[in-house]
Image: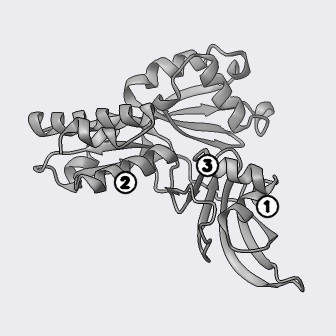
C-alpha cells in the first residue's frame, strides 16, 4: 500500500498532515541513517500516531517528553543501526528545559495558565512546547532545543516575569515531580464512559457525549470515542481541559442500583 492509499483512510486533514510528515521522517531516517524527530504531540496525536505505526508495522521509534509520565511527547524515529544507548545519548540534543525561578514574594502566585499564557502571547507555536511543570518556586518548561534560547530571552521580556531568573538546563535536572491527588466519589447508573465523563466534567449526559465525540477523552492514554465503552477498575481517564482521573474502587451500590465509585483526581 502506497503513501496516498494509507492516508486516504483518514478523514481529518490535520491527521493526514501529521501522518504524512511521519512517513517522510521514516524515509529520511532510512536514507540518511540518522535520527528524525517530530514536534511535540498531544495525547490525541500520540494515540493516532501509535495506532498508525502499529498498522504499518513500524517499530523503530520512541515517544519521549523529558520524563516518564509526560503528557506531551516527541516522536523519535531511528534507523536499524541504532541501539538504546545511542538514542538516549541524543535526547539532550533534542530537548532542553527552560527553568523560571521566581523571587520570594512571587512564589506560589503563578499557575500553569500564567506560564502557558505568556508563551502564547509571544506567538510561540504550541507544538514547540512540551509539558510545563509548575511549582511554588517557578516552572520548568520542556522545549525543543532549537527554540530554547529564543524562548528564554523572549519570556524574560514579559512583565509577569520581570523579576524572575531564567536558565536553560538539561532534562535530567527537572525538578522532582510531586503528584498530588484528591479522592472523590461519584455515583453512576452504569459503567459506561459517558456516565463517568458527565460526573467528572460536571456536565450533562448529552454534553458528555459531545466531549467524547470531539476526541477529548482518553482511557489509559488511548483516545476513546465510544460513549458506551465500559470503564474498568484501574482505568486512567483523561478529559482534556478537565483533568486526569484514576478509577480506584467500586465501593458499593445504592438502593436504586447505581454504582458508587472512588476516584483519584490529579490536582
Asked which secondary structure carries label 2, the reply is helix
**Few, some or many residues within 10 Å of mark 3 (<14, 14–19, 20+):** some
**Residue linked to disc 1:** 199
Is residue 220 placed above or below 122 in the rendered structure? Answer: below
Task: Give the SS element for disc 3.
Answer: helix
Label whose residue precedes the other's in the sequence (3 or 1) = 1
Tell whether 100 sits left or right of 188: left
Q: Is residue 76 among what the camera can see?
A: yes
Is residue 35 in view? no
Work out how far the residue at label 2 is from the one at label 1, CA to CA, in angstroms: 29 Å
Residue at 61%, 44% in the rendered image: 214
* Of the two numbered discs 3 and 1 in the rendering, the one whose residue sits closer to the viewer: 3
Furthest toward the right, the residue is: 255
The image's mark for residue 213 is 3
Q: Split into 4 quadrants, where in the image is the C terminus?
A: bottom right
Tell me whether circle 3 and circle 1 mark residues in contact (CB < 8 Å). no
Mark 1: secondary structure: helix
Residue 30's tag is none
Q: Give the mark, 3 or 2, whose residue is nearer the N terminus.
A: 2
Does residue 217 appear left or right of residue 76 in this picture? right
The mark lying in front, picked from 3 and 2, is 3
Above or below, comparing residue 59 to residue 124 in the picture: below
Image location (x, y in percent) of residue 145 = 38, 29
- Residue at 43 percent of width and 31 percent of height: 13
> Quarter of the image containing the N terminus?
top left
The residue at 79%/61% (across/down) is 199
Give the residue number, with chain letter if any, for mark 2.
51
Amino acid at each position: 500500500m502506497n503513501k496516498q492509499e494509507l492516508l486516504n483512510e483518514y478523514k481529518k486533514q490535520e491527521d493526514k498532515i501529521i501522518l504524512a510528515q511521519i512517513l517522510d521522517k521514516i524515509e529520511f531516517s532510512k536514507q540518511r541513517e540518522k535520527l528524525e524527530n517530530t514536534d511535540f504531540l498531544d495525547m490525541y496525536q500520540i494515540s493516532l500516531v501509535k495506532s498508525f505505526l502499529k498498522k504499518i508495522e513500524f517499530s523503530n521509534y520512541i515517544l519521549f517528553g523529558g520524563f516518564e509520565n509526560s503528557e506531551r511527547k516527541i516522536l523519535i524515529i531511528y534507523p536499524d543501526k541504532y541501539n538504546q544507548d545511542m538514542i538516549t545519548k541524543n535526547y539532550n540534543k533534542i530537548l532542553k528545559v527552560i527553568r523560571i525561578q521566581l523571587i520570594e514574594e512571587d512564589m506560589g502566585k503563578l499557575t500553569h495558565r500564567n506560564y502557558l499564557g505568556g508563551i502564547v502571547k509571544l506567538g510561540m507555536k504550541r507544538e514547540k512546547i512540551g509539558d510545563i511543570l509548575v511549582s511554588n518556586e517557578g516552572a520548568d518548561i520542556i522545549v525543543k532545543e532549537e527554540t530554547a534560547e529564543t524562548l528564554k530571552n523572549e519570556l524574560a521580556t514579559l512583565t509577569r516575569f520581570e523579576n524572575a531568573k531564567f536558565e536553560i538546563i538539561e532534562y535530567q535536572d527537572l525538578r522532582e515531580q510531586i503528584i498530588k491527588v484528591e479522592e472523590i466519589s461519584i455515583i453512576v447508573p452504569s459503567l459506561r464512559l459517558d456516565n463517568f465523563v458527565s460526573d467528572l466534567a460536571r456536565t450533562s449526559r448529552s454534553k458528555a457525549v459531545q466531549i467524547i465525540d470531539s476526541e477529548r477523552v482518553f482511557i489509559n492514554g488511548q483516545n476513546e470515542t465510544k460513549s458506551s465503552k465500559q470503564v474498568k477498575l484501574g482505568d486512567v481517564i483523561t478529559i482534556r481541559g478537565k483533568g486526569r482521573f484514576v478509577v480506584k474502587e467500586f465501593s458499593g451500590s445504592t438502593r436504586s442500583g447505581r454504582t458508587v465509585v472512588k476516584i483519584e483526581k490529579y490536582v
